[in-house]
Amino acid sequence: MVVAYVPDTELSVDEINLAQLDFWLRDDVDGALAKLRRERPIAWHEHPDCGKGFWSVTRYADIAAISVDTATFSNRWSIRVNHDPEMGLTRPGSSSIIEMDPPQHTKYRKLVSRGFTPRRIGLIEDHIRARARALVDSVAPKGSCEFVTEIAARLPLEVICDLVGVPSQDHDYIFKLSSESFGEYDPEVGVTPEQGSAAAQELKAYGCALAEERRRNPKDDLITLLVEAEVDGHRLTQEEIGGFFSLLLAAGSETTRSAISHGLVAFSRFPEQKRLFLEDCSAWAPYAAEEILRWATPILHMRRTVTREVDFGGVRMREGDKVAMWYISANRDESVFPDPYRFDITRDPNRHGAFGTGGPHFCLGHNLARREIAVLFEELFRLLPDIEAVGEPVKLRSNQFHGIKRLHAVFTPVR
């Protein structure tokens, strides 16, 4: 009989503080989250890293309930617990769809949703595969690579830039701005919160400039779609287009980059799963993508703001309270996922919350992310079947993004 692994932590439930950024660099995060789910599934956490305190919600069912109740739990103020208006660091982007509630959110979401349908993604799968194959071919003769920057970051960045309409010569510039805007609390990235906010603004400005060019020279890309779109009979403002552009670039590249990086770590730690994958790459790739997404959970949390006093899960939440939905904990919830600490590409059903747990803010780009992950690992393992991660991955210091900054990989060279 195989006994399921159960993580542990030396921390008491009172010592666990999900607001503290350094907590997320610990080795016992899984154990701490498991303890919260058992003993204090809705906990109050506060720390100078995050301004005002907030409610941490760690069980799958509670997170799913909050996700669908947009009247009580709003996106309007911010999606990050680190941001408070009085701190003066609220990221520009109130015009972004991700910080809207229905019905406004519904109207704006429809504008770009047709760019991410299964049919649309199916039409560009050959393009995704060609991009993935070229990246793998580029490292194959070397016998080793820095997996994050040479593979994991490049594929989603190139694909989303192509979809949006960013010229290839600007891809590296977009990568730099995106990395800075997401790494503002990691000292190694070398940007302050103010600089991270400035990078986000610069990303928006680039999108606005690209939109102006498309007004003169429309093309078959998402930025042209936004330029020509109307909401309630009105064209989008430059601010709105810039917000859309930033969200599409960031959400379309950073999160999938993290999933791919964590995926290689998982296959390296569970070699029997890679052997199974190699038996039939095409057949197993879609299932592997789902398990990689559950395992990686690229977005650790999303925030909601309470709009009215409410009793929820045994605690009294007041108007204006911040609430963090910890997807990384939901994806390890033992009541939903048997043996959740085992990476298992045969897991079925796999109702992971990597894209959210339902509701109007379910990730718009989920079809694209799934195909990118599946195709990348198909191409990677076909050419480099013995590739594996060596050493410990270098984690991003963040309580929102489950990022890996560096990951060394080795394999038999192919020339």
Image (cartoon, rainbow, N blue to C red):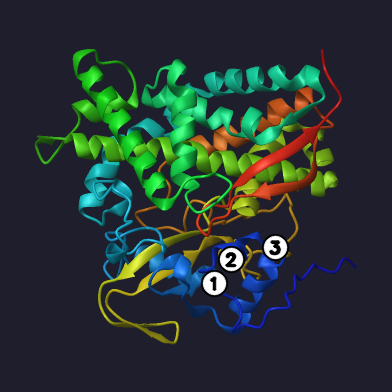
Q: Position of residue 65 (x, y in %)?
A: 42, 69
Sort mark 3 into few (<14), some (14-19) or many (20+) by Cα contacts within 10 Å. some
Q: How many marks?
A: 3
Callout 1: SS: loop
Numbered circle sitting on residue 326? none
Numbered circle sitting on residue 329? 2
Sort mark 2 into few (<14), some (14-19) or many (20+) by Cα contacts within 10 Å. many
The disc labelled 1 sits on which kind of residue? Arg
Q: Which residue is mark 1?
A: 59
Q: Residue furthest left?
A: 233
Q: Position of residue 33 (x, y in %)?
A: 62, 71
Asked if disc 2 and disc 1 are in contact, CB closer than 8 Å, the reply is yes
Separation of marks 2 and 1 at Cα, in angstroms: 7 Å
The disc labelled 3 sits on which kind of residue? Pro
Separation of marks 3 and 2 at Cα, in angstroms: 10 Å
| Residue displayed at 74% across by 52% down | 344
Numbered circle sitting on residue 340? 3
Q: Quadrant of residue 51?
A: bottom left
First-in-chain label (2 vs 1): 1
| Residue displayed at 28% across by 82% down | 309
Callout 3: SS: loop
Residue 112 versus residue 170 in the image, above or below: below
Q: Position of residue 132 (x, y in %)?
A: 62, 23
First-in-chain label (1 vs 3): 1
Q: Is residue 213 visible?
A: yes
Assign the C terminus to one quadrant of the image.
top right
Q: Is 161 positioned to the left or the right of 384 in the image?
A: left
| Residue displayed at 50% across by 36% down | 253
The disc labelled 2 sits on which kind of residue? Ser
Q: Nearer the viewer, residue 139 or 328?
A: 139
Q: Position of residue 43 (x, y in %)?
A: 50, 80
